[in-house]
Amino acid sequence: MSDPLEPLKKPLGPSTMSVHGGEPRRKLAYSLTTPIVQTATYTWASSQEVKDHFDGKLDERIEYGRYGNPTQRIAESKLAALEGAGDCLLFASGMGAMTTALLALLSRGTHVVVTDDSYRRTRQFLNGMLPRYGVEVSTVPAGDYDALVDAIKPTTRVLVSESPTNPYNRILDLERFAAIGRKHRVKTVIDATFATPYNARPLEWGVDLVMHSATKYLGGHNDLLAGAVLGSRDLVGGIRALQATTGATVDPFAAYLLVRGLKTFALRMERQNTNAQALAEFLAAHPRVSAVHYAGLPSHPGHDVAKKQMRGFGGVVSFEVRGDLDTASRVVDACTIPYIAASLGGVESLIEQPAIMSFYELTTEERLEIGIKDNLIRYAVGIEDADDLMADLAQALDRAFGD
Ligand SMILES: *Cc1c(COP(=O)(O)O)cnc(C)c1O
C-alpha cells in the first residue's frame, strides 16, 4: 500500500501518525472511517478468478476469514506505521501473538532464553509447554546481561524479554539486548506492551521482533482483546503463514475498535505518562508507602537507561505500603476512582494487588520467590485528572491506616 503521507516532510508527530498513519486515504464506499468488513469468507466471480488468485496474479485478495480481513489489514498498517516496522500481524489476543511467534521461530532441539520477570503466561508457555515439544528453555534474571550471554548455546534461536516489566517496571537496555542477539546470531523478541511505540520503539535499537498485547494501551478503552507482532516483512511473513494454521486471527470488529482507539493513542499516552509520574512522586513522598517502582523516578535502578530509550515512562506505578497483605487490600478497597480489575492501559484507571489477583494460588513464600510481595499494589493509571487520582489515593491511604 502506498503511503498517502509520503509527500509531507518527515518525521510526522505521534498524534498525526495516530490519527492518519497507515490508513489508505480512499476507503471502501468513500467512508471516512475504516469500514468493518464483517465476513467469514470472500466470493469469486469464476473458477478462473480462483485460479488467478492461487497463481498470485491478484493483488490484495483474501480467500477466507482466518487468513485476514480488510479491516485487520488497515489496523496492521496503522500499527506498523506507529512502530516503524516493515510489517505487522494482528492476533485475537496478546498471548495468541506471543505463542504463534515463538512457535514460528522454534522447533524441536532448539533453545530459548527468557528473562525471569516476563509476563506470567509467557513464562508458563515457555517453561510449561515448549519442553513437551523438545524445546529447551533457560530463564535468566532480568538485567543480568552476563547471565544472558552465558545462557546462549549453539542451539539457541531466540532471546525473549520485556521492557518495562510487570509489575516492577524493570528496564531492559534494548540496544545492549539487541547487540547480544546479533553477535550470537540469535533472534531477539521484546514484549513492549508496557512501553508502546509512543514511549519506545525497540526495532530502532536493533531488536528483531516486537510484540504487544493490543488489549492494553493500543486499544486503550478496555473494550477489546488483540495482540500484535511487528518486525521485518520476512520475519512477520513466516508468522503469518503459521497463523493460517494455528488460527487466533483478530476479529474484524476488534480490528475496527483498535483503529478507532488508536486515533487518540498519542494523547492518551501523553496523559498516562504525566498521570503516572505525578502519582509516583506523590507516593514516593507518602509516609505510609515504603517503596515505589516507577522508572520515571531518579531512584529507580532503570531510570538512566529508560531516559535514553523512552519518550515517557508509561502508565503503571507499582508501590509497597507499610503493612501486610490485608493492609494493601484495605488501601485498594478504599480507592474510589480506579476499578479493581486485571489489565491496564485503558482510559479508566485500574488497581490491583498482584498477590491476590494474578498470583493468588501461590503461598506467600512461593510468591516471594518470584518477587511478588504481599504489600505490593499495582496502579495502572487512566486518563483522569492527576489531582483527582492523587486526592483519591491520599484519602484511601488515610482510611486504610486509620490516620
Ligand atoms: C496482557 C499482557 C499480555 C497478554 O495479552 P492478552 O491480550 O491478554 O492475551 C502479554 N504481555 C504483557 C506484558 C501483558 O501485559
Image (spheres, rainbow, N blue to C red):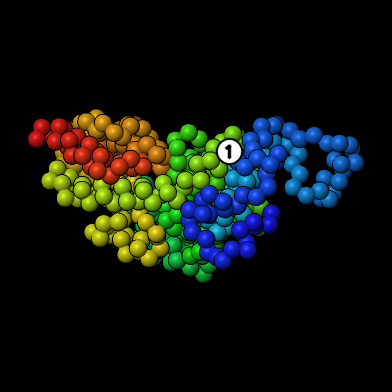
Q: Is residue 161 visible?
A: no
Which residue corresponds to mark 1?
Answer: 256
Closer to us: 201 or 138: 201
Please give left or right for residue 186 compared with residue 30 in the image.
Answer: left
- Quarter holding the C terminus? top left
Quadrant location of residue 50? top right
Position in image of residue 391 (x %, y %): 21, 39
Horizontal and vertical percent position of residue 382 = 36, 41
The residue lying at 43 percent from left, 66 percent from top is 176
Q: Would residue 8 appear left or right of 162 to someone viewing this image?
A: right
Instruction: For label 1, count other residues whose C-alpha is less than 10 Å away and answer few (under 14), some (14-19) or many (20+).
Output: many
Count of numbered marks: 1
Q: Residue at x 65, y 40 (%)?
A: 31
Residue 208 image point, x, y percent: 55, 60
Residue 276 showing in the rendered view = yes
Q: Is residue 307 above or below residue 23?
A: below
In the picture, which quadrant includes the N terminus? bottom right
Q: Cβ(mark 1) to ligand 1 < 8 Å?
A: no
Residue at the (37%, 56%) spot, across then down: 312
At 78% across and 49% down in the image, what residue appears?
A: 59
Please name whichever residue, 390 or 118, is drawn nearer the observer in this view of the structure: 390
What residue type is disc 1 on? Answer: Tyr
Query: Circle 1 sits in a helix, a strand or a loop, which is it?
Result: helix
Residue 94 vs residue 269, the one in the foreground: 269
Q: Residue 74: x percent and y percent?
A: 63, 46
Which residue of the protein is positioned furthest toward the bottom in this rendering? 183
